[in-house]
Amino acid sequence: MARPVKFDRERVLEKLMFLFWERGYARTSLSGILAATGLKKGSLYRSFGNKEELFRLALSRYSVRGPAFMGNPGPSLDSLVFIYAKLVGDAAVPELRRRACFAFNSGLEFGAARGPLARAAKAELAKLEKFFQAIVRKAVEAGDLPGDLDQAAASARIFSAAFTLREIAKFRPERRFLLEIANAALASLGTKRRIK
């Protein structure tokens, strides 16, 4: 009887996360998965399931790790300024610019599709959207934003600006251009805070 292959599950999941993050679901092949993880096909499927399950595990891992990539900001106006500054700064790093955001990438890849992977991608985007809603709500409660601000519209603007900053940086990484996007989103909230 063959002995089970021993491997570090967390390390394999980390490699899967970066692989799907960089290539997306459709462009990630089984041979690419096997090369990245160093596992044999049987071990991979026994331990993690099929390609769909591997993708869901990778996206879930990103969701848990995502705040760490952004410095673990809490929902506040300060954190929004920090996030936008980080997104603008990340555009200067080719690897970060190319990779962008796994959740945003997945949303773009699956778009209006149906099925479990599309639902998983949309669920991750919904979590991000709720985070930006919390930023606006907390900033209004703290008096950092006007009390009469249309919070739903403001949340939509700052969420879409984050998406735009991350994705447009792939082909327009010029700092000045990205600062215009970030600062226009901040101005739309009624704050004088800006990124320089």
Image (cartoon, rainbow, N blue to C red):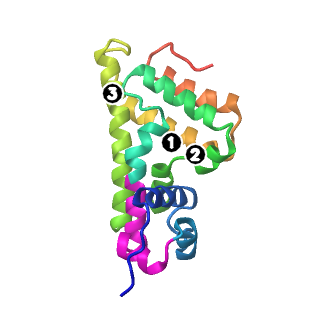
The answer to whether residue 150 of the structure is visible from this angle is no
Residue at 38% x, 64% y is 117
Q: Please, what secondary structure does the residue beneath circle 3 have?
A: helix
Q: Is residue 16 above or below residue 126?
A: below
Of residues 81 and 158, which is closer to you in this image? 81
Quadrant location of the C terminus in the rendered image: top right
Label at residue 151: 3
Label at residue 115: none
Q: Is residue 40 above or below residue 83?
A: below
Of residues 64 and 12, which is closer to you in this image? 12
How far is disc 1 from disc 2 in space, using C-alphas?
Answer: 6 Å
| Amino acid identity at mark 2 | Glu
Q: Please, what secondary structure does the residue beneath circle 2 have?
A: helix
Does the CB distance between marks 3 and 1 fall below 8 Å? Answer: no
Tag 1 residue: 163
Q: Position of residue 182 (x, y in %)?
A: 56, 28
Q: Position of residue 130 (x, y in %)?
A: 32, 38
Label located before the other in sequence (3 or 2): 3
The magenta segment is: 39-60
How far is disc 3 from disc 1 in space, using C-alphas?
Answer: 18 Å
| Amino acid identity at mark 3 | Gln
Side of 81 relative to 142 (left or right): right
Quadrant location of the N terminus in the rendered image: bottom left
Q: In the image, is residue 47 part of the stretch drawn in magenta?
A: yes
How far is disc 3 from disc 2 in space, using C-alphas?
Answer: 24 Å
Q: Tag count in the figure?
A: 3
The answer to whether residue 162 of the structure is visible from this angle is yes
Tag 2 residue: 167
Residue 19 appears in which quarter of the rendering?
bottom right
